Image: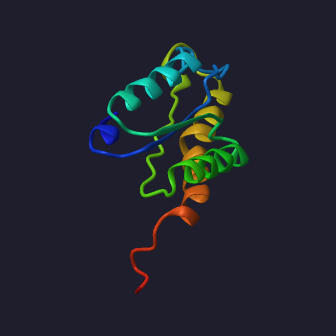
Amino acid sequence: MRLAQEGADIVAVDICAQIESDPYPLATEAGLAETAVLVEKLDRRIVTRIADVRERRQLEEAVQAGVAELGRLDVVVANAGILPMAMGDPDPMDFVDATDVDLIGVMNAVAVSVPHLPDHNRSS
């Protein structure tokens, strides 16, 4: 929301599903839709996609849709994150799930976004 308040158009991506190892509720389609409404109320454009950050192809499709509709990509904020081992007796797979989302998800977001970002070091 803060980026939209500052004048940014947004490509918003969320899994909109529960990850089994995570003990607390994750975002929903209703939450993603509410975000779209709030961004549009700020007179900004938004492209929303349901995608799993662990799946590079899904992110690539979301970024391509955003660039196609909005015209460009200027900044990437990869803020997906889970902490399934925060409660109870952690299972070793909790760490794997967290690493897949928190690390691999960020790496995927960067990998699919970099080709669309402006090269400010290139001379005109």
* Residue 43 in picture, x, y percent from top left: 35, 35
Judged left or right of residue 25, residue 42 is left
Percent across and percent down for residue 105 are 59, 44
| Count of marks overlaid on the render | 0
Quarter of the image with the C terminus in it: bottom left
- Relative height, residue 91 to residue 123 (above, below): above
Q: Nearer the viewer, residue 50 or 52?
A: 50
| Horizontal side of residue 20 vs 9, given as left or right | right
Q: Position of residue 17 (x, y in %)?
A: 64, 21
Residue at (63, 52) in percent of width and height: 64
User: Which image quadrant is residue 98 in?
Assistant: top right
Q: Position of residue 100 (x, y in %)?
A: 63, 40
Seen in the picture, residue 60 relative to 94 is either above or below; the reply is: below
Q: Residue at x 55, y 62 (%)?
A: 116
Specify the quadrant of the image occupied by residue 39: top left
Task: Look at the image and tell me in which quarter the N terminus lies.
Answer: top left
Q: Is residue 39 left or right of residue 112?
A: left
**Is 118 in front, or is 102?**
118
In the displayed orientation, state which residue is furthest to the bottom.
123
- Given the current orientation, which residue lies at the most extreme front position? 43
Q: Residue at x 35, y 27 (%)?
A: 41
- Residue appearing at x 62%, y 40% in the figure: 53
Where is 111 relative to 55, above or below?
below
Q: How is the image coloured?
A: rainbow
- Of 42 and 61, which appears nearest the observer? 42
Q: Nearer the viewer, residue 33 or 70?
A: 70
